[in-house]
Amino acid sequence: PKMFPQKRGHSLTGPVAVHGARPGDMLSLHLAALHPGPWGWTVAAAADSPVTRRLGLTYARPASLLWEIDTAAGTCTADRGFVRALAPFLGVIGLAPAAPGEHSTVPPRTETGGNIDCRELIAGATLFLPVSVEGALLYLGDGHAAQGDGEVGGTAIECPMTTEVVVDLATGPAVGSVHAETPAGRITFGFDADLNVAMGDALEAMIGWMQHLFDLDKATALALASTCVDLRITQVANQTWGVHAVLPAGVIAFAADPTPSWS
């Protein structure tokens, strides 16, 4: 690995050129397997942020947890005795932005993904990313053994990760922005420093997806979404915060007789 004299972002694999990928395409990345290493760490209150300021921890001594990861048992055990289930995923999966120059890996980007930190992107999920440059230039890493929605302390159980992915170009995607099909369901994302904006972007993308799936007008899709779509805070750790909308798998079915009894 290449080591830099100053902290500059995440330790990632990439950029990986995808043959035939061009601006305007949609890259699909299927997470076939995720194998965490035997150890991990979590730290909180280590940096000045809106969260640490709100909690009065700006000048506090950082707290940390060291974890032993047992893939056979499916558990993570902390040095203070806490045990939680293993749920590995990659925090960072993204493509190169179109703008020239050096780009931080910290904030996720609406156009190309990146530091998404969505815990639903486990093995079996497929993430779709808009392509902005020739060859797409895929980068990925930031292994997490487990995380809660929000990544509220700024880190998850950070760990080494061996990953197997299958990359392809999606044809005729129903959603033009970053989105995913996961074991939990269909997911759309919003990224912004303002959670209200991030929420609106995630919801609007999900409404559009439901219009496509169920052949609905926008208002009817919103009515249906109000009965079944979950809005979750993806992370509040990356300067540009995230919200994801989830249409749970199997939550909507069609009646055998679609004619209501009162008609």
Image: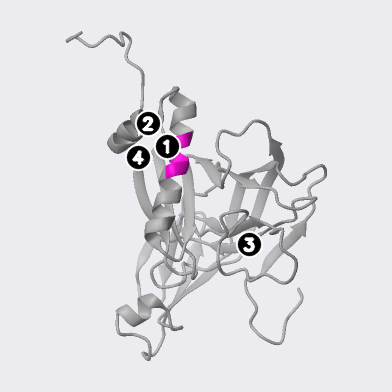
State whether residue 127 is above or below residue 41: above
Residue range highlighted in magenta: 204-208
Where is mark 2, residue-wise? 221
Horizontal side of residue 171 vs 219, given as left or right: right
Name the kind of residue labelled 4 in the image.
Val
Q: Is residue 92 visible?
A: yes
**Discs 2, 1 touching: Cβ within 8 Å:** yes
Residue 175 sits in quarter:
top right
Dot 3 crowding, Cα within 10 Å, few <14, some 14–19, many 20+: many
Q: Residues within 10 Å of mark 1 (few under 14, many from 20)?
A: many
Residue pointed to by mark 4: 229
Nearer to me, 62 or 204: 204
Who's the residue at 78% across and 48% down the image?
Answer: 18
Q: Nearer the viewer, mark 1 or mark 4?
A: 1
Q: Secondary structure at mark 3?
A: strand
Question: In the image, what residue occupies the spot 28% across and 35% down?
Answer: 227
- In this rendering, the answer to whether 13 lies above or below 203 is below
